[in-house]
Amino acid sequence: MSIGILLRMVATIFSKGFGMHDDHFLVIEQAQSWADGTDYLKWLPWTPGNTGPQGHSFFYVGFNYVILKTLTVFGLDNPQWKMYIIRFLHALLSLLVISFGYRIASLIAERKTAYKVALLLSVFWFMPFLSVHNLVEMVCIPFLMYGTLIVLRQELIRKQNDPGYHQTSFLVAGFFLGLAFSVRYQTIFYTGGLGLAILIAGNWRGMVSTALGFLASVVLLQGAIDLLVWRMPFAELIEYVNYNMNHAYDYHTNPWYNYLLVIFGLLIPPASLMIFWGFIKEWKSNFLLFFPIAIFIIFHSFFPNKQERFILPIIPMLIVLGFVGWEKYRASSGFWQKHPKIHSGLWAFFWIINLTLLFALTPMYSKKSRVESMTYLRQFKDIKYFVVEDVSNSIVRFPPVYYTGQWPRYDAITSEIGYSALASGKDWSKTENQPRFVLFIQEENLQTRLDSVMKYLPELVYETKVNPSMMDRIIHRINPVNANEKIIIYRNKALIP
């Protein structure tokens, strides 16, 4: 726990920015706009331009809204400082993953093995970085694990006829599993698998109680909230299901084994192979834990839309069960008993790679140029409108306007929307309609691009340049798909002398 706290505090302080689109734009951007009395993304029915439910659970966004609103009431208006507090609270929440992982492992294995499980959950290279950001796939994990812990403990008590069995505990477990669902809808497949595992174990009362607890949680946090907002229970959930059914092929449609490759890579081979082998070996002796993880992996493997982060909710549980299973297998294997040095060498390789990645990723300032460019604009008051010039791309790389401390409008010049089309569409011939700033993405052909813009905005002057972080640059070199933007900011003297 001490190691886990230390690493997560490092991430809290240094790992600014955001990792992926969803953990900022679908959480912080919207929550802060509500705290400021607006609805920037037009999610609410009374906002002009809203077209109905968007398919977003209001529970987790609402949680962040309460935090940001409270900070605003107490006079904290610096976006970066508010994010320090948000990351700190998420770091504390993530420590529960270590605790619950240890407690689950201690129920099915020796304490020594449970300590090793807790250590892995503390220091796996991706855990501190992902844990402090607003990624719903990570935030749902403590709720999943706590519900699982309660169910596992009660099932072991029931099977062993020990004192302490309580039917109401399954209600509590179901309630926390419902909290996980309200954060991340897809966890229903883990919860459904767990419920089926309880039923297969012969405890139909426990299954029913878990289901009732789950329904109570979901009705309260999904049905009731949507009823208040939309005058229709589960409006956002229904839209989410409809959208995913109708747009399943609009995103990444990798082969069915994609998530197996993600797991093997994420957990670092050959350790990942050992952990997965241990997971498979435990299918019978710990079916209650094995089955929901397997159901979750199988569903995501065959659903067309595959994004790597979707598999994250079951990764800690896979580590717990897989490592326990591997340790049991190794203890009974003649080969590994005769070759302990090979085993130690494989884990030594794992620790070298893991610690290298851990020290590189934990303090990483992700999407620095986009965040710092908006932070720079914060010093200017009343930024009603700006433009992003990214003419070499067809997809807009969204600026995180939260960091401006304001809610300006913006447009993008892309390969789809050219200079003249935007200038005429927004009537830049009138000075009051012009953007106050133009942000050029990357330096390639900058002078030519600048000349093209200055045909319509002749009073642009250079303001500053914002560079990406070192890790942003390294990741871009490894995989050019990851955006690595230098952002050059020009100010419109016609509006800001």
Image (cartoon, helix red, strand yellow):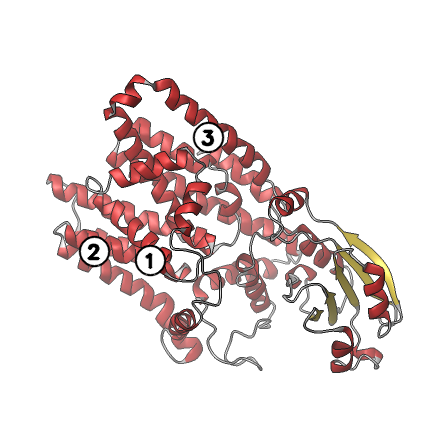
Does residue 103 show up? no
Q: Where the C terminus falls, by quadrant?
A: bottom right
Query: At numbered mark 3, what does the secondary structure look like: helix, strand or loop?
Result: helix
220 to 471, vertically: above or below: below
Q: Nearer the viewer, residue 174 or 458?
A: 458
Mark pair 1, 3: CA separation: 29 Å
The residue carrying pointer 1 sits among few (fewer than 14), some (14 to 19) or many (20 or more) residues within 10 Å by Cα, namely some
Q: Amino acid at mark 3?
A: Phe
Q: Please give the count of numbered marks on the rendered protein.
A: 3
| Image location of residue 193, percent across then percent down | 26, 55
Q: Quadrant of residue 241?
A: bottom left
- In the image, taking residue 313 as reference, residue 190 lies left or right, namely left
Mark pair 1, 2: CA separation: 15 Å
212 to 264, vertically: above or below: below
Name which residue lies at 57% across and 42% down.
11
Numbered label attached to residue 196: 2
Q: Quadrant of residue 321?
A: top left
Q: Amino acid at mark 1?
A: Phe
- The residue at which mark 3 appears reads as 350
- In the image, taking residue 416 as reference, residue 318 lies left or right, namely left
287 to 442, vertically: above or below: above
- In the image, taking residue 226 as reference, residue 65 lies left or right, namely right
Q: Nearer the viewer, mark 2 or mark 3?
A: 3
Query: At numbered mark 2, what does the secondary structure look like: helix, strand or loop?
Result: helix
Say if mark 2 contacts mark 3, CB within 8 Å. Answer: no
Say if mark 1 contacts mark 3, CB within 8 Å. Answer: no
Q: Nearer the viewer, residue 102 or 334?
A: 334
